[in-house]
Image (cartoon, rainbow, N blue to C red):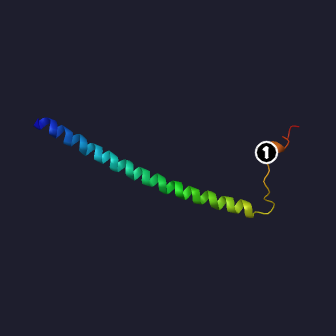
Amino acid sequence: MEKRLTDLEIKISFAEEQIDALNKLIYQQQRQIEWLAGELQQLRSRAEAAPGAEWRSLRDEIPPHY
């Protein structure tokens, strides 16, 4: 019985370490997502503010070999 309790305590300890590591990773990923969303918003703002920034589809353009 004592060995089983010790084994469970060891497993719980490793699980807690993994949970902490995953929480740190999720936090870093969330910060990166927020940063990328900010960058995307800035790029959209720049594209909208650029002169002649009308939207056009590449499907409407004729390829150069035609």
Q: What residue is rendered at 13% in x and 36% in y?
A: 3
State which quarter of the image contains the C terminus.
Answer: top right
Using the image, determine if residue 4 lies above or below residue 61.
Answer: above
The residue carrying pointer 1 sits among few (fewer than 14), some (14 to 19) or many (20 or more) residues within 10 Å by Cα, namely: few
* Residue 6 placement: quadrant: top left
Q: Mark 1 points at which residue?
A: 58
Q: Is residue 56 left or right of residue 46?
A: right
Q: What residue is rendered at 68% in x and 62% in y?
A: 45
Front residue of 46 and 64: 46
Front residue of 9 and 28: 9
| Count of numbered circles on the image | 1
Residue 17 lies, in percent from the top left, at 30, 47
Q: What residue is rendered at 15% in x and 35% in y?
A: 4
Q: Is residue 62 left or right of residue 12?
A: right
Q: What residue is rendered at 51% in x and 55% in y?
A: 32
Looking at numbered disc 1 in the image, what kind of residue is underneath it? Leu
Q: In this view, does 23 lie to the left or right of 9?
A: right
Q: Residue furthest front?
A: 1
Helix, strand or loop for disc 1: helix
Residue 27 lies, in percent from the top left, at 43, 54
Q: Which residue lies furthest to the right in this view?
A: 66
* Residue 44 placement: quadrant: bottom right
Residue 25 lies, in percent from the top left, at 41, 50
* Residue 62 placement: quadrant: top right
